[in-house]
Image (cartoon, rainbow, N blue to C red):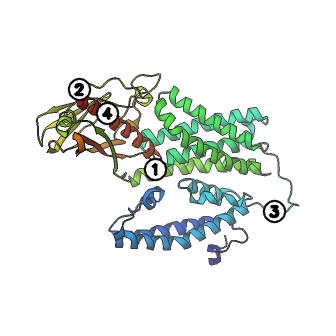
Amino acid sequence: MKLRISDLWTLRGTVDRGTYAFWGIALVLLKYNVDRVVTAICLRKFLTPLDYWRPENLFGVFPLTDDRAPAAILMLLAAIPFLWAGVALTMRRLRAVRVPEGFVLLFFVPVINTIVFAILCLLPSRPRDAAEPALPPRGGWLGRIIPESQLGSAAVAIAIVLPITAALARLSTDALREYGWGLFVGLPFFLGLAAAVLHGYHHPRSLTSCLSVAWLATVLLASLFLAIAFEGAICIMMAAPIAILLATLGALVGFVIQSRTEGGRDAGPVVSSMILVLPGLFGLERWVDAQPPMIEICSSVEVDAPPEAVWEHVVAFAQLPPPKELLFRAGVAYPLRAEIHGAGPGAVRHCVFSTGPFVEPIEVWDAPRRLEFSVSAQPPAMRELSPYPGITPTHLEHFLESHRGRFVLEPLPSGRTRLEGTTWYTNRMWPSAYWKFWSDEVIHRIHMRVLEHIRDRAEANE
């Protein structure tokens, strides 16, 4: 290991794995402490490592408001030299292990950059001398169990990675109760990469072959989760887009690694490094325990009736008809009716869903203009669609939580009313930007089911 300060800015040449590991760890620690000092002084906020993995609002460090702009500028300026050093070191390390330098883009992908860093620290540097001696036959225990045929190597590669991936998923969800970046980003990336490099252990395989093995492994893993009652079909379908995308990205990296002359020898270190790194990422998420942002969803309809006629249906409404939406028919919880006990602030409203009641103590009773309430109890977010009745994955418990709700009735000309419903909720599944897309859509559809029912009843004067 040869340490030179010029390693931090030069793009030429290569860097050995010891030097790369030293500078990588040192820069991460230094950058974290610089950011921690800035946020502590400027914002009175304690910065956690998990904040770097949250892409929304400047990676979740803080909301971008006028009073916080100086801290944002300081952090962005401080990040420039660290970004340059990270890119320079990673490009030179990729060059040293004979991997295309374009893979430096993975440096900017949360969780995956940690896995790639670990792999680059383990892979030996490879000289580019055309006269280098021939490599010995590939042996070891992997060589004995992986067949040389294309079909056989694909089957054994999948047979190896499936139980490992399933065990890691179980560790994250059941043992650590974490549905985070490690589970939804790191794990599918591992699945695709490991399947590809094991598939090419004896002979380099084509890109199509590596992608096919990764995709088949992803489908079989989803089928395994369904078969062993680990997850329901709805959640598997929601996670499928990000899982397939990350498995594809992992397979691309695996294809490059196994396509080199010495690629098969790196299969063991690559897979082993990921198996060791991923539990650490799960544990980090558990230790950090980052709190999800409060999300506000607002929906509205116009009602051909005055606010006084609409109000009585807002406070409590009769049984709704069975849902027509496929989402609700598949198991996502949907509202059935609303009941009120008492009147005014302190009354308790029960909004009964298909999975149980929401208990909503009334905080603001401003008839016929505004009704606001908190949520003191709530049912599961769905009934899982599964061959096994009554399965309860961990994410059904306190991962998607409603905290507050509000109805606003705004009078319009000609005796009409604009009825607006708002929910404030949190979602503890990460990456939050991805799962927010699903949860926002579900809550908006719940809103519209209720608002349209109220509109129909008020217009019918029932």
In the image, which disc is placed on residue 452?
Answer: 4
Whether residue 337 can be seen here: no
Of 47 and 284, nearer the camera is 47
Secondary structure, mark 1, is: helix
In the image, which disc is placed on residue 350?
Answer: none
Earlier sequence position, callout 3 versus callout 2: 3
Quarter of the image with the N terminus is bottom right
In the image, which disc is placed on residue 318?
Answer: 2
Comparing labels 4 and 2, the label whose residue is closer to the camera: 4
**To which quarter of the image does residue 415 belong?**
top left
State the residue lying farthest toward the right: 131
* 3D distance between C-alphas at marks 2 and 1: 35 Å
* 3D distance between C-alphas at marks 4 and 3: 68 Å
Secondary structure, mark 3, is: loop
For the point 19% across and 37% down, the residue is 311
Amino acid on which the number 4 mark rests in the picture: Glu
Earlier sequence position, callout 4 versus callout 3: 3
In the image: residue 73, left or right of residue 187: left
Q: Residue 299 location, x and y as percent? A: 33, 43
Earlier sequence position, callout 3 versus callout 1: 3
Amino acid on which the number 1 mark rests in the picture: Ala
For the point 69% across and 41% down, the residue is 211
Give the residue pinned by disc 1. Answer: 433
Give the residue pinned by disc 3. Answer: 128
Comparing labels 2 and 1, the label whose residue is closer to the camera: 2
State the residue lying farthest toward the front: 414
Amino acid on which the number 2 mark rests in the picture: Ala
